[in-house]
Amino acid sequence: MVESTVSPAHQRLRDRVKRFTRVDLLPTADVQAAFIRDHDTGDPVAERFVAQTYHGELGPDRSRALLDEALRVGIDNVPDAPDSMRELFAEFESIPEWVDPELVERGAAVWRRWGYSLGAVGNAGTMDTYTEASLAVPLSLSGGYAGASALHRYLETSRWWLEVCRPGAVLTPGSTAREVSLKVRVMHVSVRARVAEHPEWDADEHGLPISQSEMMLTLLGGSVAPAVGLFGLGFLTSPAEMRAVLHFNRYLGHLVGCHVDDMFPETVADGLRLLYFFDATRKHDSGPLGPELVEGFVPSFTPGPELRGLSRLRAVYHLQLQAGYTRLFMLPWNRRRYRLPSGVPGLAILLVRAPLVALIEAARRLSPAIDRWWQLGQVRRWRRWHAWHLGQREEKFDAGRSLRR
């Protein structure tokens, strides 16, 4: 089992806060135990499918075609689908008893209001975790967020975000949101299997690559972290909306194979406790891989020499915005480890526009029409940015992709 020890500094802070406020910064002992245990837990149902198909006799190309066919016509209409594939679809298509469709939709609406900021703050928070080898090694080996491919991998993730927050999409059979979610799940499992066999992976130290615990951190990065962090930029997310976006992310976790029901937070406070526990148990063991990933991402927004005029200004604007988000949402003592653009111009842009965002956020509470206009506008700007950066490239969510070393 992976060892996790709370640092003395975090323990002292926790003790002081608890003594004076009776608020515990750490999760319960049961949740801590579950978080530690699930570093060794993967996604058995999807793993059997990938082992039998993508990594088995069928091979990546035939497996990819079979998966596409089942998503297009339904698993019952694919007579040569293996049993492991039928088991995967049965689990994927089931709706857990705890799902509240109204809460799921309210959570998706929160993502639509956050728009581009969701991806930017989520990515900045994710970069903050690259001090950990358990997170950095799989990303470095797969090459997704390393070097020149970093921006394209981010665009792939953005595509998933954009699809799952469409009204009603994640609960609609056959939707693109569900299709992409299953492909993301299969891709994660394929990468997990390849990384687990790689000599750079230390199973005794880190458990499984892309474990259940680490996947849950990404769900908190799409709910609790931005709900609290974006307040300072004018996004006035109410406690009820925070609970809704937590519920939405829990269901997204179900779709991508993250089953952490025994420790998934029901409140924002519980989510913050889990994030504090993660920070308190960091090992800071990623070595050169952390800088490789962090220092490669923001510069990937640098405009190429082919861009001129307004297109170049647009690219510079987004480069500065991304740098500004890292200055706001990476812990300062972690950010100082890396060579990053200053982020000051982007930070200034974010702070200057925060009062306008807050004004619109307040107005949307008084008018459903303004709320709808705000959601549509935020998503439209997000999609426009995504399409402009994507160009002629295509998101593949490729489970057959080999490790880069």
Image (cartoon, rainbow, N blue to C red):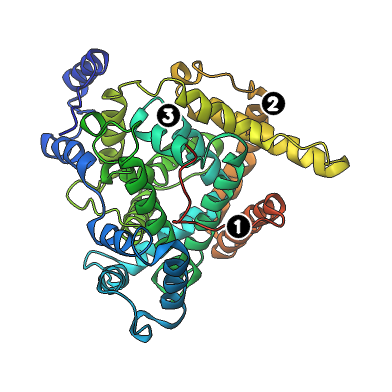
Q: Residue furthest right?
A: 309
Residue wearing tag 3? 130
Q: Is residue 352 visible?
A: no
Residue wearing tag 1? 379
Say which of 341 and 286 sits in front: 286
Say which of 39 and 401 sits in front: 401
The answer to whether the residues at label 2 and label 1 have Cβ atoms under 8 Å apart is no
- The kind of secondary structure element at disc 1 is helix
Where does the image place residue 141, in percent across and percent down from the top left?
44, 37
Which of the 4 image quadrants contains residue 393?
Answer: bottom right
- The kind of secondary structure element at disc 2 is helix
- The kind of secondary structure element at disc 3 is loop
Disc 3 from disc 2: Cα separation: 24 Å
Q: Earlier in the sequence, mark 3 or mark 1?
A: 3
Where does the image place residue 95, in percent across and percent down from the top left?
28, 70
> Which residue is drawn at the image coordinates 41% and 67% (left, top)?
63
Foreground disc of the pair 3, 1: 3
Circle count? 3
Check disc 3 and give the amino acid type: Tyr
Q: Is residue 110 above or below residue 37?
A: below
Q: Is residue 363 visible?
A: yes
Which of the 4 image quadrants contains residue 49?
Answer: bottom left
Q: Is residue 234 above or below residue 98?
A: above
Q: Is residue 138 above or below residue 387?
A: above
Check disc 1 and give the amino acid type: Val
Residue wearing tag 2? 345
> Which residue is drawn at the image coordinates 28% and 31% (left, top)?
202
Q: Earlier in the sequence, mark 2 or mark 1?
A: 2
Check disc 2 and give the amino acid type: Pro
